[in-house]
Amino acid sequence: MAVPALAALRMYWGTVALLTGSGLLALAAFLPIAALLHIGPGPAARLGPWLERGADLGVGWSQDAQGPAATQQQGVDVLFHLLLGTAVATLAIAAVTILALFGARASRRESEMLVSRAVGASRRTLAASALFEGVIVAAAVLASGCAAGMLAARWAVGSWPGRILPGELIPSLAPLVTMGAVILAGAILPLIFARSSRIVEAEVKPAGLLGPAVLQLGVSLAVLGVSALLSRHAVILTAGMNSPARNGQVFELTAADPRPADRAARYASLLDQLDGGRSKLVSLTSPGTLVGLGTLSTVTTDCGICSSGGMALRWHLVWTTHQFVSADSFKALGVHLVAGRGISRADGWNEKPVAVISRALAARHFQKGEAIGRQMLVGDDPRAWHTVVGVVDDPPATALGGRLQPRYTVYLSILQHPIESAELLVRAPPADEAVPFVRHALQAALGPGSMGTGPIAERAVIAAEAAPLVWFSRWFAVEGWATLAIAVVGTFTLMRIWVLSLRPELGLRRAVGAPRGRLLLGILARAARTGLIGAAFGLWFGQAIWSTLPSVMTGAAAWDSRVLLRLTLLLVVATLAGALFPAWRAMRSTPGSLLGSEGD
């Protein structure tokens, strides 16, 4: 049993190499994603937020309130599970390719099997030999794939631009068992079902052989499309870093006073000191505000004479994003005032609570869109009624997960809601001279230990939001190119089998005088059609995946014609290349040899 198996492995070493390479690529692409699922307790994605956000926001929130870090985590989870789905697709494409390779090898060994049966070899002996071959190939694939996958997993963890929940990186058994089962099935099934189904039988329709090729090409196009769209969005996001206006420094600070009134006084003192210096702009905001993130909770608006569903409804309970800002924050954020006024330095702790709201909130939840002067309840405290003093347009939330926030935003004075942790943005050229001045003001106003991390360049804050997109685009590219490489191997194999199944037809056409060039062009045209059908399937299948991106990231595209055209051309060229070599060999054969043989 061992000797025939080893001899077969040596004789068909090229096919064995393709089998091993396909399985290795699939495991190396899948195992890093699967291993991340096992870091820490539970089955959720283990990639944490890359910037920690403060939790205390100085008001009484309902239990369903959600902080900026949780919003970021939701965005990470969406992309991670999308990445996990593409990894599963890569594994499935590898399984189809491995079965096709085993089928191609079985077609070439048909005469060998017939001779072995003629000299007395039983089907059980042949099946045992094939099973032994499969065990050897499976061992090689699993050993090399597991090693490559775990190395890639360590790289994935090390390159994540944030924290990873603690835990050990361990290989997932599911893909290993799946890959081993596929290899063993591919080795043994062609022999078990040889009497009822043989891949090179004349009854097999050539067109039926191209279905797996269409599937392989389509999935690879969909995965590569995700990578290209994410990379494009990351480039657009980071392009804003070079804007001359974004030349500030961001300081993360903490006011440790237990009483909100004391914190408010310290924040007011800090702003007074910085405004009296050389600073052009001083903005004190809640964590995440600079990139459009806030705390998600409800407000109750005094709509006035409003109706909903034909019923008069004065009080509207609305799910909104809450951000805490100072007087210069609207200028720093690029928020334009539409009506009324913005938050001012006069809106301090002892003054009447005020709020500035987004245009969409004013139009939808206040009578006739006239919100100025009307009341709004913020948080769960029935005494926390705020007067709306301004309406603004909202800038896009550039952070990952920004589109998961409500479309309505409420801006509150940070002096009336003095949160424990805040972000201070100072624009005061030259930055090197401004940093010591700001540090001195922080020490004087907030006391020792008030500094968190920083200063951080304002451009680096945006870069930190683009970093996870770069990470995901890189891993989608890994999945996509691994899928494409496996698909090319499978397509070459299936196109070869398809051309071989056409040999009798080609021989007959050659015998009645059909030119070789016309026959070759006909084969290539049918191959190109297969590639185009695969690309069309990829565009249809990919649209369901690509449409997820704009729902997570503001400004992300769900379609890029130039990128998808390049990928489509790549798939068609791969299909043509797979059909060209066997078609060229068939054209060089005589009509008699084409009519008299079933295979190579």
Image (spheres, rainbow, N blue to C red):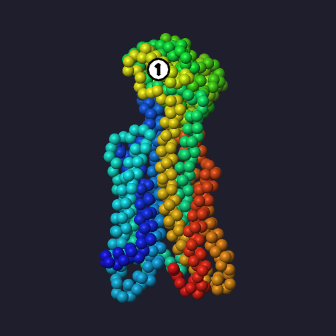
- Residue at the extreme top of the image, as rendered: 350
Identify the residue at image location x=44%, y=59%.
25
Read off the residue under disc 1: 436
Instruction: Give the residue type at disc 1.
Output: Pro
Query: Which sits in the foreground, 504 or 248?
Result: 248
Query: Which sits in the foreground, 29 or 344?
Result: 29
The image shows residue 423, relative to residue 549, as above or below, that is above
Q: Quadrant of the N terminus?
A: bottom left
Identify the residue at image location x=61%, y=79%.
587
Q: Where's residue 552, x and y in %?
A: 53, 41
Label 1's element?
helix
**Crowd tier of the residue under label 1, counting other residues whose Cα lies within 10 Å: few below 14, some 14–19, many 20 or above:** few
Q: How many marks?
A: 1
Identify the residue at image location x=63%, y=70%.
524
Identify the residue at image location x=57%, y=47%.
229
Q: Where's residue 452, x and y in %?
A: 41, 25
Left or right: 509 in relation to 40 = right
Q: Where's residue 94, x and y in %?
A: 46, 62
Please indicate, yes or no, whether residue 380 appears anywhere in the rendered image.
no
Query: Which sits in the foreground, 354 or 429?
Result: 429
The image shows residue 557, relative to residue 483, as above or below, that is above
**Quadrant in the picture for residue 99:** bottom left
Q: Where's residue 390, x and y in %?
A: 61, 21
Please indicate, yes or no, whether residue 23 appears anywhere in the rendered image.
yes
Query: Which sits in the foreground, 379 or 295?
Result: 295
